[in-house]
Image (cartoon, rainbow, N blue to C red):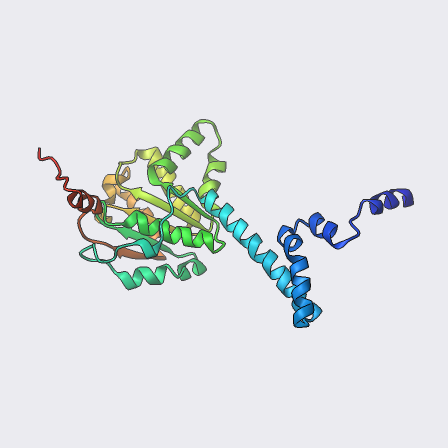
Amino acid sequence: MSNHKSAVLLHCPDNLESILEYLRMPVSLKNYKQLLDIAGKENLSHEEFLLRLLSDESSAKFERQAANRIAKAKFPSVKTIEEFDFTYPTKIPKQKILHAAGLSFLENAEGLIFIGPTGVGKSHLAQAIGYKAASMGVRTLFTRAVDMVNYLDASQSDHTLHKAIKVYSSPRLLVIDELGYLPLNKQGSDHFFNVISSRYENGSIILTTNQAFKDWGKTFYDNTVASAIIDRLVHHSEVIKIEGDSYRIKDRKLKGITPEKN
């Protein structure tokens, strides 16, 4: 036993550089000599020196983790609230959206539902708030509604549905984009309901849709499923309605391109 301990001790790091390398603290390893010099010149206490050294390391680790969370969130592109043109929609609750961007809704597993016609910026806002959440340390996942349902359909075929449901139930924030563009069959509607039900009062959802609630029966297999989904979503969600013409039409007009008439 003693020989084994001696062998282990022989491999333990015994100087500052090797200890920092062993502990995987690359920022501290890079900066400690400079900080030692500053500590001498400014007569820093041991505590202040350690605080500065470890603060830099902690910040760098947080940034690496944030980058990893953003990558795992699978956003199709990076969107921010600052980039959004609030002047274009004819009707948009700007202050409500800015408040939501503060992420307080996450504290009680509440949600956001963006409702409006195609092209008014619903997806941009959902991605922007989701991106900010991921950047702030929140485990987040982005998916289009049809992609989620197709994935769950496939998992049912290969008997991994329970595991697949966890993909969408486990993140603290789930962003579901473009609900209502394609109707769902009975199996797809059931899958969608199961995801919403599994997250009810357990995790936050941001959802975008081009369909008013009264028309959700057209998206889901029947009105009963639609009502059950709406009931769970709306109970703890802020409904944000946006009105206006499509940004894409605006861009075409700016480029001198007019839509073809049938």
Position of 201 compared to 121: left or right? right
What residue is rendered at 13% in x and 38% in y?
Answer: 259
In percent of width and height, residue 98 lies at: 33, 61
What residue is rendered at 67% in x and 70% in y?
Answer: 41
Front position in the image: 125 or 205: 125
Front position in the image: 53 or 186: 53
Point out the image quarter for the C terminus.
Answer: top left
In percent of width and height, residue 129 lies at: 38, 54
Residue 214 visible in the shown view: yes
**Displayed quadrant of residue 152:** top left
Q: Is residue 153 above or below residue 49?
A: above
Q: Residue furthest right?
A: 2
Position of 229 compared to 120: left or right? right
What residue is rendered at 26% in x and 41% in y?
Answer: 180
In percent of width and height, residue 50 lies at: 67, 64
In percent of width and height, residue 199 lies at: 43, 49
Residue 231 visible in the shown view: no
The total number of labels drawn is 0
Q: Residue furthest left?
A: 262
**Displayed quadrant of residue 2:** top right
Front position in the image: 100 or 230: 100
Point out the image quarter for the N terminus.
Answer: top right
What residue is rendered at 74% in x and 49% in y?
Answer: 18
Q: Residue furthest top?
A: 158
**Displayed quadrant of residue 110:** bottom left
